[in-house]
Amino acid sequence: VDHVQEAIQELEQVRDRRDVSLCTLMALVYAQKKRPHPDTIQELDARVKEDRKSASPKALYHAGMFLWLLGRNDKAREYVDRMIKISSGSTEGIILKGWIDLTSGKDAYAKKSGKYFDEALKEKINIFALMGKVVYYEFRQNYSGALEIVNQVIVSYPSFMPALVKKMKLLLSLQDWEQTVDAAQRLLQRDKNNLEALRMLALHSLCREGDIGEYYSIIMKASLLIILCCVQCGRAEKMLQHTYTMVERSFSQASRDAELATELGYQLVLQGRTKEAIKWYQTAMSLDESSVSALIGIIRCQLSEGHLEDAEQQLEFLTEIQQSIGKSELLYLRAVLATKKRRSQDEITNLLNDTVDTHFSTLQGLPLSVEYYEKLNPDFLLEIAKEYLALCPAKPPAQGQAPVPQLQHCASVLDTVVKIVPGLLHAVFLMAKVRFLSGDIEAAQSSLQHCLDQKPSFADAHLLMAQIHLLQGNFKLSSQSLELCLSHNFEVREHPLYHLIKAQAQRKMGELQEAIQTLQLAMSLPGVKRVGSAAKSKARRVELSAADCVSVYLELAEALWLNGEQHEAAKVMQDAINEFTGSPEELRVTIANADLALLRGDTELALSMLRNITQDQPYYVQAKEKMADIYLNHRKEKRLYVSCYRDLVEKMPSSHTYLLLGDAYMNIQEPELAIEVYEQALKRNPKDGAVASKIGKALVKTHNYVKAINYYEAALKSGQQNFLRYDLAELLMKLRQYERCERVLHEALTHDPGENFPRLLVKVFFVLCVFAQARDVQAKVLKRVQLEQPDAVPMQKQLAAEICAEIAKHCSNQHGYERAVKFYKEALVYCESDSKVSVAESVCAVCLSLQLTLLSDMCACGKEMMADLMFRKQDYEQAVFHFQQLLERKPDNYPTLSRLIDLLRRAGKLEEVPRFLEMAEKHSPRAKFEPGYNYCKGLYLWYTGEPNDGLRHFNKARKDNDWGQNAVYNMIEICLNPDNETMGGEVFENLDGDMGNSTEKQESEQLAVRTAEKLLKELKPQTPPGHVQLRILEHYCYLATKQKANVEKALGVFTEIANNEKDHVPALLAMATAYMILKQTPRARNQLKRIAKMSWNIIDADEFEKSWLLLADIYIQSGKYDMAGELLKRCLRHNKSCCKAYEYMGYIMEKEQSFRDAAMNYEMAWKYGNQTNPTIGYKLAFNYLKAKRHVDAIDVCHKVLDAHPNYPRIRKDILDKARAALRS
């Protein structure tokens, strides 16, 4: 409005031009309506009507374009139709008509628009028509077709930015995030402030990676809309403060904008500041009385503050006026109100179900896009999930019982959120909680581990993990989880749930007094006692469910009772009754009271309490189960025991209650009656495989085996769950029908390579003495699960190890000792470190059983295996002990010596290596001419920072058949990286100033690359992995040139290998290195993160170390010193001589101004680098100087200058200053 006059002046200047006069007049009419001048408007309208009669095709086209841009599609169509008619089918007009129809909002028109673009494109390529076709394909949800067209546009018009933006959005619609991010980064290379690209990277950073810190600067540049959308992905405090400031600033510029005032209120709600939020919502209502969003905000705040009557009145009013809209927020607020007013669970559940259905209906037909994420509103869905969870029991169901339906509804909501927003850790945590409460413990642990890997300080995840360990009976692991939680987040001590779990673990371990003290501390914390709790601790609000509050009381009462403090226990129970009277949790207190009555031996009082719980109350089923337990175990009345479950079936008939009755009949040895009841349950839920399994087991219990087999087979034909095959196979196994059992298990394996099927199949093969088949089956299963079920790999490896050990045991019994050792070795390859000891001991036992002629050799084999085992367990002293014994017996055992050198390097004891080399020299005068000796000597020199001497010794072993190939590999590595730098790393890249770019050094590097290329020709690998290793080394030579074309060529090969070889660490590291050289750090980091999540293994030990160092380098560059420090500690755990890790640690300490700690780390780097690297010497001396250790600084300076007299700066920067400091 402020610039209307300027617009009118501009339009007046072109008003008389024939081709644009008509649309100019229309624009003037539009402008004049902004500041009404009736006479002028009337005059202009008359002129428009007059000009329209004689308008040229061009004038009509521009007029149609103007009307289309104003959104007046019907009027625009009239002008364009006339233009096409008088111009005999103008291409421009046809294209514009296509756009008008496509954007009309009417499906009938939009569906026909594609033919106009096709017609226009028959004559020649037109960018407007091509982009129209792209949007048409989007409308038809043919995103692949749209992408194909947009690629044509980019090829024909490479600088056309809208096409590049559209491609990025289409890739997102196709859910190809990797290419979407790639497209965004390419856009930013052309335009570093491209808003769409920044928005996309912000979306990816928050929603997919969950890493707010990493792209914080990018997110700050992105538009407010996407920030508000992304804020819903996690409620990150830092982001909320920033977005609140931005909205506040916007409101100061437009103080009459009700939407901005509403948004300010919402921002405050997200921060938990409801009282301030209400004021902003009221401000919004004063600016716009019809604002539904503001009214919804006020109701939300009223519910939060406990003003239920006011909220209910407002909700009734709003529901009346919004009936036709069906807003999901209204339904949600009604559900919250129903919860707070303690209405029935069914009513609350129905309202939540309606909320979810209404909310997801708005997403139908929407592709994955910024708009989709905004409408998805993950934060809102998490609030719904929490309401569902509040209706669920606090513990998983007993075995054989189905989870409550609310958990299934909750899981479906969270499943959507986790799939679309995997970076939202709180959603993953809630999914873990749902799985825990559903009884799927393994899946819950897997989700929690993911949360803790991403965010080690996630207190709620630690607490739930501790609960799971407690449920499983792992009390020590539970305590460890709590300690770990406390170490990461000290504030958890203020969380009553922490103390509750800790007390439960203490009670289970018999530490009653400690448990009582812990629970008494929990009782004193805010949030447990409702009376007065609001006044306490306003600084930090701890969310604790009513169920957990009750649990604190009940646990304390039980602990006091068990400790002999019955009077105190009764007082706590009375407090609980007073606290929770009138709430749904009151019934839990009643059931607990009944338990106390039982402990006193008063069964009648316990039963009378439980009889008072009626069927319309929550916990009715639990009360009936408790009554049944009393009748069976305390009063031994089977008839009354069953009658409790019959009452349940009569009053609450469902699949679950029928199952309970069936289980009751099984418990009193009435399988025939149980079968009848189970069949009723199955009729109610025909797809429930658990019920079918119970029927089968009941038939087996009645010894009706034939009927059981027929039943299982019929159930499987009707499409029941696959685990019934296991039940059938187990029955056939017991009946010794091995061939039939084998056939069933093979069928099962084709459906699901689960844990039990291969185990049972192996058992069948062992019974049939077909050992080779058992091993082959397991090998196939292992190959499949690596692709289909990666989480099951450790379990299947353990099974493979057990199979090999069993075969070895059988061979040993048959006196086939050599074969036994072979299979025990194979078992060692499979089994995890904890179980390797027993396997290695078995090997040694077999060795001792061998004939005398083989005894010494086989014992050496056993010792070597034991040494290898100790090495893998990182018990370096024991490993060294075993290797020493082998070398003392035979000092020229060079394979053992080479492994010992690697072991001593990892143990941080390289100074011990010369003794063993001297032993070899004394043992044989020709030792210095032996290829094995030269290889070992070269290895030692290379590891101690003398690559040139190492290269000479490797060269002496290069032509040998046994040692040559390994020597050449090492020579190539030295040529490509003689100074053992972090290839691709940037932290130390320019630390030495111009020295790093000197012509002499560049020529030296080129010569080294040429030498490496020559050496590559000598490699003749004999195995497929060897060929892969050769390809990687060949293309590392391309990387070493640091020329973009060569690096990109190498990257293509590394990517191909990584795609073909799953989790191939060397290939992934090579890809990351290439990306770093190409300055594509985010891509490099993604590959390195993949490696960081993998389990360490000895074969790829060096690659793991290099990848951790490179990832640490990236983290240091971005200031994430804690994350870098964790990776560096991991390096040092596996290699205590890792000079580079110490150097990085020193650098971090130096940056943090902790010069003493920096000096200590540089000291270790200096030591393990054999005091040969002048750069480390300089850093060590510098930090000695800063730490006031002047004599040590002077000493190091002398050592550096003795070896490198011309080393820059050290004399002036450090030596002279240290001397001056000593003199003063």
Image (cartoon, grey):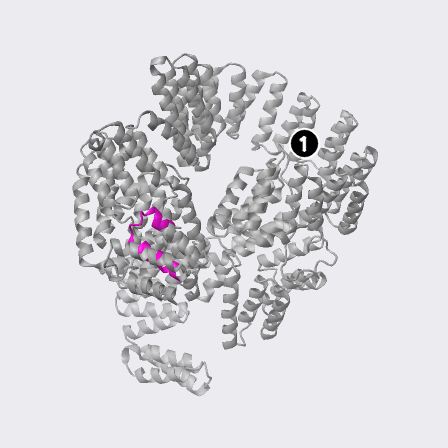
Q: Main secondary structure of the magenta part?
A: helix
Left or right position of 1187 against 85 = right
Measuring 34% from the left and 74% from the top, which residue is drawn there? 63
Give residue 452's position: percent from left, percent from top.
51, 47
| Quadrant of the frame with the C terminus | bottom left
Q: Confirm whether the magenta stretch covers residue 1181.
A: yes
Task: Tell me the residue that label 1 is attached to.
Answer: 660
User: Can residue 94 be seen at all in this image of the molecule?
Assistant: no
**Residue at point 36% right, 60% down?**
1182
The quarter of the image holding the N terminus is bottom left
Magenta extent = 1164-1185
In the rendered structure, which amino acid carries the disc numbered 1? Answer: Leu
Which quadrant would residue 816 be assigned to in this image?
Answer: top left
Between 348 and 11, the one nearer to me in the picture: 348
Q: Is residue 227 or residue 767 the one in the foreground?
A: 767
> In the picture shown, does residue 1212 fall above or below 441?
below
Q: Is residue 585 above or below residue 1187?
A: above
- The residue sitting at 41% across, 82% down in the picture is 4
Name the foreground residue: 964 vs 127: 964
